[in-house]
Image (tube, coloured by chain):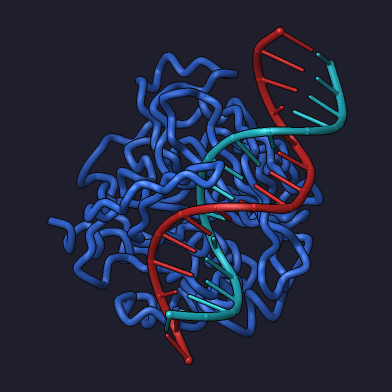
Chain colours: A blue, B red, C cyan
Amino acid sequence: MEDMLGNSSFSDYISSSFPSQRVFDFSCEEETMPLGFMELLGVQDLHPSLFDMTQQTPLLTRPLHNPCSTKIESPPPELQTLPRFHRHQLRLSMMSLLKWTTRKKTRKRPRNGELKPKKTNKKRQREPRFAFMTKSEVDHLEDEYRWRKYGQKAVKNSSFPRSYYRCTTNSCKVKKRVERSFSDPSIVITTYEGQHTHPSPTMPRSSLGAVASTFDMAMQRTPSHYHQPFAANALSPLNFGQNGSSLNPSFLHERRFCSSGPSLLKDHGLLQDLVSSLMLKEE
DNA sequence: CGACTTTGACCTGCGC
DNA sequence: GCGCAGGTCAAAGTCG
């Protein structure tokens, strides 16, 4: 763990965990995200503490290996003096906000030897994806959406299989992948793809409108594991607090809703640097 | 009996 | 073109 979080960059770690995927790709390239990053984060709903944290929490002690994230590479000196524990917290938070770029893929397979339909020329747009790392003994972390497992695959260079889940709601195309970190089997990496198009089937969200972003969902549908004290190393982006107590389900109702827009962006911390530069690029 | 999981086969993209 | 790895399908099995 220390090796992953302390002695090497997360991008290193993820790159090895997801060897064929590009990680921390905050739109360096031409490909643009279908949604703004802040949207994907449900930023209008982000708990202010997240930004509070970024204001007072040190940045990564080592640069991420992302040439675009130049701001990350020069943390203000004062931030370097904050406790390592907090640096890790923020790092873990940043680590959790992974985004993969879209990847072309088309398919519909025939069974029984029928010929498969020809590929279309259209590139298949992949939904943005976000990974959450959580220390847990349970592979499938409970959130308040219902998931159906539709596949499991052995992962190369890992003794742990990767499981594939789909939201059970008909019209909802959200998927998630669950796997264990090969370098630290106690860590579960949950990757969400897409956005729910419906409220949680198990918790009405009258105050939240019909469309919840995946991140928003992930932020709000705090798995029970997140309720563990941070000392238990729940590696969620939500775990900014020392004990995660603000992350219980009532968080959904208790959290203050940030007003959208500029006021939120007063922060000068890492996350904002990262996000705002991304947003600028998108504009 | 419906919802869900398991699992092997199949499909696709990518690197060589 | 081939092989590999990731991702998905769908039949069969399991469970409540």
Q: Is residue A81 visible?
A: no
* Image quadrant where one finds the N terminus of chain A: bottom right
Residue A14 location in percent, x, y? 55, 71
**Residue at the location (43% across, 71% down)?**
A22
Residue A136 location in percent, x, y? 76, 51
| Rendered view: A91 above or below A4 | above
Q: Is residue A105 visible?
A: yes
**Residue at the location (47% across, 23% down)?**
A170
| Rendered view: A114 above or below A1 | above
Query: Considering depth in this image, is A129 or C13 the residue closer to the camera?
Result: C13
Please count the marks in the image. Answer: 0
Question: Is residue A147 shown left or right of residue A45?
Answer: right
Query: Considering depth in this image, is A268 or A215 the residue closer to the camera?
Result: A215
Question: Is residue A137 shown left or right of residue C11?
Answer: right
**Residue at the location (72% across, 70% down)?**
A158
Residue A25 location in percent, x, y? 36, 68
* Image quadrant where one finds the C terminus of chain A: bottom left
| Rendered view: C2 above or below C5 | below
User: In which quadrant of the rendered view does residue A47 lie?
Assistant: top left
Question: Is residue A128 shown left or right of residue A19?
Answer: left
User: In which quadrant of the rendered view does residue A78 lie?
Assistant: bottom left
**Residue at the location (48% across, 35% down)?**
A217
Residue A163 location in percent, x, y? 66, 50
Query: Considering depth in this image, is A164 or A218 the residue closer to the camera?
Result: A164
Query: Considering depth in this image, is A82 or A202 the residue closer to the camera?
Result: A202
